[in-house]
Every structure is written in structure tokens, then in C-alpha cells.
Image (spheres, rainbow, N blue to C red):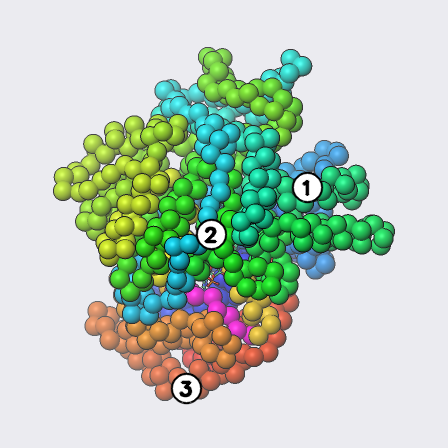
Amino acid sequence: MSKIFYTKTDEAPALATQSFLPIVKAFSKTADVTLETKDISLAGRIIANFPDYLKEEQRISNDLEELGELAKKPEANIIKLPNISASIPQLKEAIAELQEKGYALPNYPDNPSNEKEQDVKSRYDKIKGSAVNPVLREGNSDRRAPRAVKNYAKQNPHSMGAWSKDSKTHVATMGKEDFKSNEKSLTIDAATKVRIELSQEDGSVKILKDNIALLAGEIIDATVMRKAALMAFLKEQVKDAKDKGVLFSLHMKATMMKVSDPIIFGHAVEAYFEDVFTKHAETFASVGISSNDGLENLFSKLNDLPAAKKAEIEKDIEQTIENGPDLAMVNSDKGITNLHVPSDIIIDASMPAMIRNSGKMWNAQGNTQDTKAIIPDSSYADVYTATIDFCKKHGAFDPTTMGTVPNVGLMAQKAEEYGSHDKTFEIANSGSVKVIDINSNATLIEHAVEKGDIWRMCQVKDAPIQDWVKLAVSRAKATQVPAVFWLDENRAHDAELIKKVNLYLNDHETIGLEIKILAPKEATEFSLQRMKEGKDTISVTGNVLRDYLTDLFPILEVGTSAKMLSIVPLMNGGGLFETGAGGSAPKHVEQFMEEGHLRWDSLGEFLALGVSLDFYGEKNNNAKARILGDALDSATEKFLINDKSPSRKVMEIDTRGSHFYLALYWAEALVNQDKSAELKATFEKVYGELRSKEEQIAKELIESQGSTKDVGGYYLPDSDKAAAAMRPSQTLNSILDAI
Ligand SMILES: NC(=O)C1=CN([C@@H]2O[C@H](COP(=O)(O)OP(=O)(O)OC[C@H]3O[C@@H](n4cnc5c(N)ncnc54)[C@H](OP(=O)(O)O)[C@@H]3O)[C@@H](O)[C@H]2O)C=CC1
Ligand SMILES: O=C(O)CCC(=O)C(=O)O
Ligand SMILES: [Mg+2]
């Protein structure tokens, strides 16, 4: 019999699971639904990949690999919570925590000097960054705010910072010699294999990657970001931010674009701290400081130096900050800047948060200030420029009246940038990079490159494109809302995609539907204008815009992307149900440790479980599972109407209290249905008890707050301690245990 696979992940969502999963298990049991947990946490993935270093009893199965295989089967039914896409500093922290817990794992070798270290590094590099989503996402993405969520936001609008016409906030982007401007693209006629090679100036040839299999109809693109142009751009921005008196802030995605963006981040650190890096180049090299890992790592490595040297460097850094433009802060109280950790500022969440906050970010004094948002590559920067310009002109959006922009995103089978991880290279020697067809020996794409340039290739297969067009048409039909393909005919890759979109639209009945193709800037303006007028518009986008827009619009519309329904209809018939569109909210864990209050909003989990149960019922002919799913949907609506989402403040309802109310309403809905007398009878008792003890349970849950919490670890918490911390109401626990 098939099962629902529920993922164990990291940080706030993993804590929330400790409280929510016991409820889900207790309820599902009554409908003969089997649930199994799979560990895709960062710690779990590390442990699973190093069995040869570990004791027998420490070894665990490779759950990600198993789920990846399952995702290709029609019976797949996976509930996927957000997991950490680890930057190098996070990966190193996780390794250190595991070593401390007795796992004899090797250190991450920054500069491997032998084969063994090379093997260790390549295993860790597979775990690093966005390593889970591309494996599980064997389908395209359908993300939207359900009607109940929109209605809730209209009645309970979140705060929106006012915008002023003379805000100095702006986006700075390269526009030349970047990934967008240097892109070349073509569609492959017949299946073949290609290799990527670097012809170096001394005449020698270095193979960067061999035997890349391409299918007929596959689109490939390749491009290069030039280091010299990037450095000149970044230095200009440092100066300009100082001149204009705005915050210097860098926005990119070092997690998802795990090869290119940490390098770009490192260049920004070096551009800002140019004097420091020039003066101390040798010292930095001697202790293995890499600008790519950020300031936090730099400061910790200074401890390996003699005290006087350390003090001298710290003073130079302080001086540079004092003389330079103000830096945007991640945490002003703790002195954590935008340049501390590459994974701290992730563009999909950071730009909308800034736009929601009047276009301001935090400065070192803990005040908000206008900002220069630096987005080096110009591929999608226009979207934010257009949004900022729109807010300057029209003022902030009004959540009580604005429309919605759902998304249909192309991402199946490592589409587009998801497939670039193993085809992105920091160029070691000047020359030219060529993509060569192994069968015909023809050069398909060629770029002249210099040392330090970042070259990358992406691919997108034909079948996912067909599936994406089909999904877009079906959403447009289901909602009768205009659908816009965000594609720019002047961009090489998009021009290839446009040909296919026009071709595959012919496969569908589209009479009466409004379907457009607009470049990202125009698509943003079109959608924002409609949104302001209370009208809805479907955005149909490639992979990166899928990521950006499914935080941007939800954060403006409903305050957070945690409330999104996030479905991935898998191409082979299964279902992957993601929980919201946000990340793993590290800030929330910090608050939980300090104050015992967790403000993770599990609405995404509730929505995902609802569709997963429904899907389960349909696939397994299990009527009770569908009743359970329907009841959960009604419960979620009531939950929203009664506003039982976690509060941000300690001693008010938190994640655990919100789960209790969901259970209460879920039981109530099962009592109120008439399709299954058996379920009704079971839940009459449960509901009666939950209702009569509501006050007692709510009190026990609140009283457990207000003190520090210890769950025995960050990346690998102690599951007994975490369960105890997340299930503090004995009254609730015993009712659930009795189901
Ligand atoms: N699908 C996945 O697996 C994803 C994973 N990630 C990973 O998550 C980590 C953290 O990423 P980051 O960019 O900081 O993004 P997060 O989404 O974790 O955090 C940004 C902010 O979003 C809000 N938020 C997100 N989810 C919730 C929720 N359920 N309830 C309440 N508020 C929420 C909070 O903002 P506020 O304070 O404004 O309320 C939060 O501080 C990274 O490792 C990243 O790679 C990121 C995105 C998706
Ligand atoms: O894969 C990742 O690292 C993050 C993905 C993400 O942010 C998203 O899917 O919205
Ligand atoms: Mg995202």
C-alpha cells in the first residue's frame, strides 16, 4: 500500500514538526493512512553520505536518494518542508556539531591536496547549497494563495510600510558583461552528448565537463559574468552608496546558485574591504581566509593569528566600515552585517521584506534607512526596479483590496539554473570556453574568457516545457484569469523558450483565455497595475522568477509566503506537496531558544496535508482519507477566520498553540460531516475532550513560554528534548495518545 512521506528537515520547520506530526499521525490512523518520516535535514544528509567514517550504529539510510527515486513513480506522495540549503559556513558548523556529538566526520577541505580530500570535498559539495529541491522537484510548480488565505489577509491586513516619492532606495545592476548580456542559447535537434572545454592561451585544452547527455528538443544556454566588469561595478556601488547616503546591501542567492553566487558575494566583500584585503593579502592566505565565506568566518579565523596582528586587522576593518557607506544589517544588535554570511541575505525573501518595509533596511544603529540594493546580474533585477518605481509612484499596496499573482514555474528535471550547479566554473586561465558536440565535433557555443570570470551552462528539457505550458493553460482555465509568460524576446534563452511556448500552446484549447508573453519588466508593470486594481494575474515563469515571485507577491499580498499552497504535480503522476514558499527561518529558532516562543506559521503544512490526503484518497480508493482531507480544509478555514496563527510575541499563542487549535477544528469538522459514521463516532469523543479542556491546554502551552529552551543541538537536536519542548501540554498529549 502506498504511504504519505513526511519530511524531517531543519530549524523552525523541524521544531514545528515535533508538535504537528503527532497530531497528523493520530488523525491519519483513523482513516488507515500510513505515514512515514524521511530525514532530509542537513545533518541527516551529511551522516548518510559518510558511512565509511562512522560506527555501524551511527549510519543511516540515504533518505534523499530514496525520495528522489520515489518522486519518479506514480505513487509518490511526499510532503516536503523547507530545509537548509547550506552555505559553506553553515556546512562547516553542522560538521563541527556532529563531530562534537561523536561522529568521526572529516573536516571540509577548502583546498584538497590529495585524492582522499578531493573525495571528501566532492561528497560535501553535493550536500551543499540547494541540494534537496532539484532532486525532489520532478515536476513543475504551482504556487498560489488559496481564497481563504486571501480573504483572511483582506480582513486582517498585515502592516505595510508607507512609500515616499523621494525615497532614495534603488536597485543597482550591471547590465553589461553579466550573465544576462553574455547569454547564448540554442535548441538541440537530435539527442547527443556535449563536453565543455577551456582552450587556454598556451594552446592546451582543459576539459571542464565531459559527456553531458542532451535530448532532442532540449534548450541549452551558456553565459559568462566577467570578473573585471563585476569588480568595477561593485567598487562604483561602494562609492555611490557613500555619496548618496544610502545603505550598501547585496542581494543574491548563494544557496540556490551555489557555485556562482558565493564567488560574487566574495567579490562584494573584497570590493567593500578593498584596502584590508590588499594590505593583508598574505596574512589572509596564511590562515586560509576566503572572502567567499564572509566576514563572520574572517573574524573567527583571525583567532589563529598573533594577538597584535589580529587587533591590527580588526582595527583596519572597523576603519573601512567607518569611512565606507553604511552597511545594511542582518542583526543590528549583534553587529551582523549584510556581508557576514553568504546565506544570510537571500534575495527572494530579502527584497520583498525591504519593499514591504518602505524600501528600507536596518543600519548599524538599529534604525531603518534607504537602501542601494545591489543585484549584480541584470537578468531579473528589472522586476525589483519596476516594483520599487511602482511603489514610489503609487505608494504602498493595500492588502485589503489588492489582487493576487499566483505562479506556474518551470523547474522539473533540473530545469534552467537548477541544472547549472555542475556546469558552473570559475575560470582558472584566460582563453575560450567551448561547448562541443561530441558526435559532430561542432562548437555549439563559445565565449572568450579571462581568469576569474564565472562561466555557466544551463539546460531545460523539452518534456518539462510541454508540461509547464499545459499547467499554465489549465490554471488559466480553472480560474479564468489572464496568464502571462514572463519571457524576454531579447534574451537568448527566452527567445528559444518563446518558440516552444507558441508551439505548445497550439496543443491546448485556449479560446476565451487571455495568454500573453511579456518581458519581465513589462510583466511586472502589467501585473502590479492589475494587482492594485484588485485583479488577479497568473505569472508563468522560468525557475529563478518562480523563486523570486513566490516570495515577492505573497509577502506583499498576505504578509508571508508561509501561507502559500505550493504543489508540484510530478511528471510521472505522483504528488510533491511543499509547505509554503518560504525557507527555514533561522531567526525563529533563535527566538525559541531565548524566549521559548516559536512563531513558525504552519499554514503551509496544513494546506499541503489537505491536498496530500485528498490525493492519497484518490490514488488508494480510500474514501476516509478524502473525508479527513476535506475536514482539514474546513478546519484551516476556521483557523484563519478565528485568527489562530502564531503571534510574534512571547506569552501569546505560538506554533504549538496554533497546532492545538487546528486539531480542535479538524476534530470538529469530522464530527460535523455525514459521509463516515465511523469517523464521526471516533471524533465525537476527541472533539468533546479537546473542547472541554481548551482553556487548560491553551494555558499549559502559554505557560511553557517565557524561559530559555534547550533542544540539545542546532543541526542535530536531541529528538527527546525537542519533543519535550514542543509538546508541553500533557492534557493535549494524552487526548492525542488515546485516539
Ligand atoms: N523550500 C525550501 O526548502 C527553502 C529553503 N530555504 C532555506 O531556508 C534557509 C533560510 O532562508 P531565508 O531566506 O532566511 O528565508 P526564510 O523564509 O526562512 O526567512 C525569511 C523570513 O520569512 C518569514 N517566514 C518564512 N517562513 C515563515 C513561516 N513559516 N512563518 C512565519 N514567518 C516565516 C520570516 O519573516 P518575517 O520576519 O518578515 O516574518 C522570516 O524571517 C536557507 O537555508 C534557505 O536556503 C529558503 C527558501 C525555501
Ligand atoms: O532550493 C533552494 O535552496 C530554495 C528554494 C526556494 O527558495 C524556493 O523554492 O522558493
Ligand atoms: Mg524561494
Which is more foreground, mark 2 or mark 1?
Answer: 2
Residue beneath label 3, please? Answer: 695
Q: Nearer the viewer, residue 262 or 387?
A: 387
Secondary structure beneath disc 1? Answer: helix
Say whether disc 2 or disc 1 marks the residue closer to the N-terminus. Answer: 2
Badge 1 crowding class, 10 Å Cα cut-off, few under 14, some 14 to 19, many 20 or more, is some
Q: Residue at x 49, y 55 (%)?
A: 370
| Label 2 close to label 1 by CB (< 8 Å) | no
Is 507 or 351 nearer to us in this picture? 351
Task: Name the mark on residue 274.
Answer: 1
Image height of 89 relative to 119, above or below: below
Image quarter hosting the N terminus: bottom left
Mark 2, residue position: 168
Relative to 99, say whether 520 is above or below: above
Report how far apart the C-alphas of labels 2 and 3 lie in the structure: 50 Å
Residue 425: image location, x then y, percent: 58, 31
- The mark tally for this picture is 3
Is residue 693 among the parts visible in the rendering? yes
Residue occupying image coordinates x 59% and y 32%: 227
Instruction: Answer with left or right where residue 384 lies relative to residue 510.
Output: right
Disc 3 within 8 angstroms of ligand 1 (CB) = no
Task: Tell me which segment is drawn in magenta.
Answer: 596-604
Specify which label sits upstream in the sequence, 2 or 3. 2
